[in-house]
Image (cartoon, grey):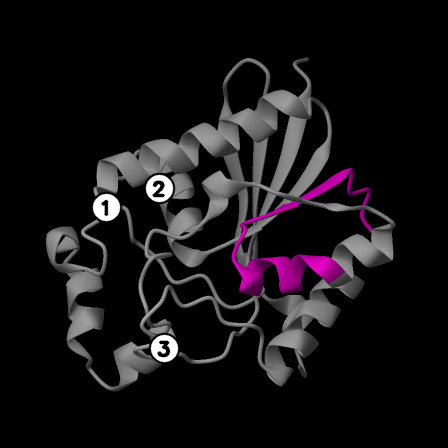
Amino acid sequence: MSPVVQLLLVRHAEPERIEGAGVPADPVLTDAGRRQAVALAAWLAVEPIDHVVSSPLRRSVETAAPLAGALGLDVEVVEGLAEWDRESDSYIPVEELRETKDERWQLMVEERWEEMAGGVDPAGFRAGVTATAEDLIARFPSRRVVAVCHGGVINAYLGGVLGLTRVLWFHPEYASISRVAASASGIRSIVSLNETGHLRGV
């Protein structure tokens, strides 16, 4: 049997809202987000986690820190896990965009990438995310790796595993967990999607 890597993709916890900062928005976690990060750490600390990596953005690093601390591990920052809109000067929660029927929500729903902040190439974004995930899988054979990142990153990689053409196809909750089993033979299986049981009562 081929060695299997357990790759756990975690969306960052809830960050603060920033709009029109004039520089790339890089918010820290809210109080609720910090509680979510602690709950995530308590949930995963009982599993045999071998490595914790994070997007360079602060909301991901702050989400990863309690888990790494509980496990006695360092957080490795991986540039390729950054979100597609990392250069935007605003961070508005997707939930708010949806509820207020903001035009930016409609752009995402319709995947009108050329009109989104930064004018990101979706194929290039997915290719970069996939290469980053596959590099982690290659580097840690037979290990369990937690990658704290972003909703778009999780969508892009898992959608590729499923063979979907859409890049943004589901809504990962804050501090949710999605699991992939990756064999050395190249088979990638989605084990779970959007786990949130650890957030009850948070």
Q: Is residue 13 left or right of residue 19?
A: right
Among numbered discs 2 and 1, the one appearing first in the sequence: 2
Question: Which dot marks residue 166?
Answer: 1
Residue 48 colored magenta? Answer: yes
The location of residue 13, given as percent across then percent down, is 57, 68
Disc on the earlier residue, 3 or 2: 3
Q: CA distance from mark 3 to mark 2?
A: 21 Å
In which quadrant is the C terminus drawn?
bottom right
Q: Is residue 114 above or below residue 141?
A: below
In the image, what residue type sits under mark 1? Arg
Q: Which mark is residue 193?
A: none
Residue 64 image offset from top left, x and y in percent = 67, 57
Q: Residues within 10 Å of mark 1 (few under 14, many from 20)?
A: some
Residue neighbourhood size for the residue with mark 2, other residues' Cα within 10 Å, grouped as few (<14), some (14–19), many (≥20): some
Please report whichever mark, 1 or 3, sits nearer to the chain's N-terminal start.
3
Q: Residue at x 30, y 33 (%)?
A: 163
Residue 93 visible from this viewpoint:
yes
* Position of residue 148 in the picture relative to residue 52 (left or right): left
Q: Quadrant of residue 53?
A: top right
The residue located at (82%, 42%) in the rendering is 48
Is 145 magenta? The answer is no
Callout count = 3
For the residue pair 94 and 92, the one nearer the viewer reads as 92
Which label sits on residue 95? Answer: 3
Residue in the image at 50% along x and 22% along y? 187
Region rendered in magenta = 47-65
Callouts 2 and 1 close, C-beta under 8 Å = yes
Question: In the rendered structure, which amino acid carries the disc numbered 3?
Answer: Glu
Q: Which mark is residue 159?
A: 2
Q: Secondary structure at mark 1?
A: loop
The answer to whether 152 is drawn above or below residue 139 in the figure is below
Choose between 87 and 69: the one closer to the eye.
Answer: 87
